[in-house]
Image (tube, grey):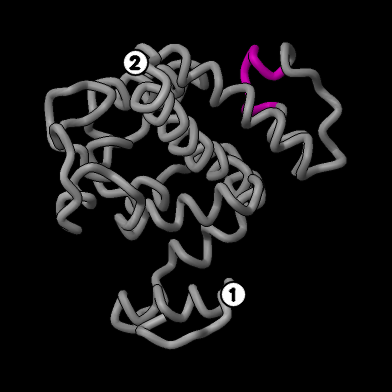
């Protein structure tokens, strides 16, 4: 980092991110590392929070020439992190589908870290909400995976596909992270909140 030949570690990256944030102990950093998903996804979400994830806007800032800098999912606005994961009409549809599925109403935030911090369910305890925040991370991961399929594999932008893949990933990662998961994917698809409560 900074021109020095340093070995990459999670600690060194954390310290670098702290420098970027002027040394502040931002609460979402601490909360993010406790969510129950695979570690590579957490690191990805960390980059989203800091708006350092590869997007067309970030490529333009680094003077990378592209045919256009519009969102790969909607094609209507510049592809920034806030737009791609939250403001894009395709991403917004995914979040709305999720909220209707679990029968909750979440306030819309267009800043990644605010969305993560406020992604809560009142009827869940603290541990349950740590698991629930993994849902937020998984949705962002699923949006990114689908976006890449659109860009590199000529897939069709489809909010329902993103939603279904996010459902599957949440169940699979919960099962991987907790030995208490005894319910099937089809059981969980009825409504996830009671099943999250059952493993906390």
| First along the sequence among labels 2 and 1 | 1
Figure quadrant of the N terminus: bottom left
Indicate the position of residue 46 as horizontal and vertical percent values. 45, 57
Task: Name the residue at 69% across, 28% down.
Answer: 171
Location of mark 2 (residue): 157
Q: Nearer the viewer, residue 135 or 5?
A: 5
Classify 10 Å Cα crowding around label 2: few (below 14), some (14-19), many (20 and above): some
Residue 190 included in the magenta stretch of the image: yes
* Residue 109 percent coordinates (x, y): 27, 42
Q: Is residue 156 above or below residue 88?
A: above
Residue at the image point whose x is 42% and y is 35% from the top: 144
Q: Which residues are magenta?
A: 188-194
In this rendering, the answer to whether 158 lies above or below 87 is above
Residue 41 is marked as none
For the image, the number of numbered tags is 2
Q: Quadrant of residue 199?
A: top right
- Viewed as shown, does residue 161 lie left or right of 10? left
Left or right for 130, reference 2 = right
Tell me how far mark 2 sits from mark 1, CA to CA.
36 Å
The extreme bottom residue here reads 4
Q: Circle 1: is it few (<14), some (14-19), or many (20+) Cα within 10 Å? A: few
Seen in the picture, residue 173 relative to 155 is either above or below; the reply is below
User: What residue is shown at x 52% (from left), y 56% (from top)?
Assistant: 43
Residue lying at 32% horizontally and 37% vertically, measured from the top left: 85
In this view of the protein, which residue sits in the foreground, 99 or 14?
A: 14
Name the residue tied to disc 1: 9
Q: Is residue 121 magenta?
A: no
């Amino acid at each position: 980092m900074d021109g020095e030949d340093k070995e990459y570690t999670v600690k060194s990256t954390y310290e670098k991110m702290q420098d970027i944030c002027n040394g502040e102990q931002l609460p979402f950093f601490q909360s993010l590392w406790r969510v129950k998903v695979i570690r590579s996804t957490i690191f990805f979400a960390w980059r989203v929070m800091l708006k350092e994830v590869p997007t067309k806007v970030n490529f333009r800032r680094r003077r990378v020439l592209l045919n256009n800098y519009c969102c790969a999912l909607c094609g209507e606005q510049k592809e920034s992190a806030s737009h791609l994961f939250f403001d894009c009409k395709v991403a917004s549809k995914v979040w709305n589908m999720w909220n209707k599925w679990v029968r909750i109403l979440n306030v819309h935030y267009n800043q990644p870290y605010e969305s993560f911090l406020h992604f809560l369910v009142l009827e869940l305890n603290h541990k349950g909400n740590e698991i629930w925040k993994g849902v937020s991370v998984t949705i962002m991961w699923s949006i990114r995976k689908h976006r890449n399929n659109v860009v590199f594999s000529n897939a069709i932008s489809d909010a329902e596909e993103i939603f279904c893949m996010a459902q599957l990933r949440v169940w699979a990662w919960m099962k991987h992270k907790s030995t208490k998961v005894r319910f099937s994917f089809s059981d969980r698809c009825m409504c996830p909140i009671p099943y999250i409560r059952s493993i906390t």
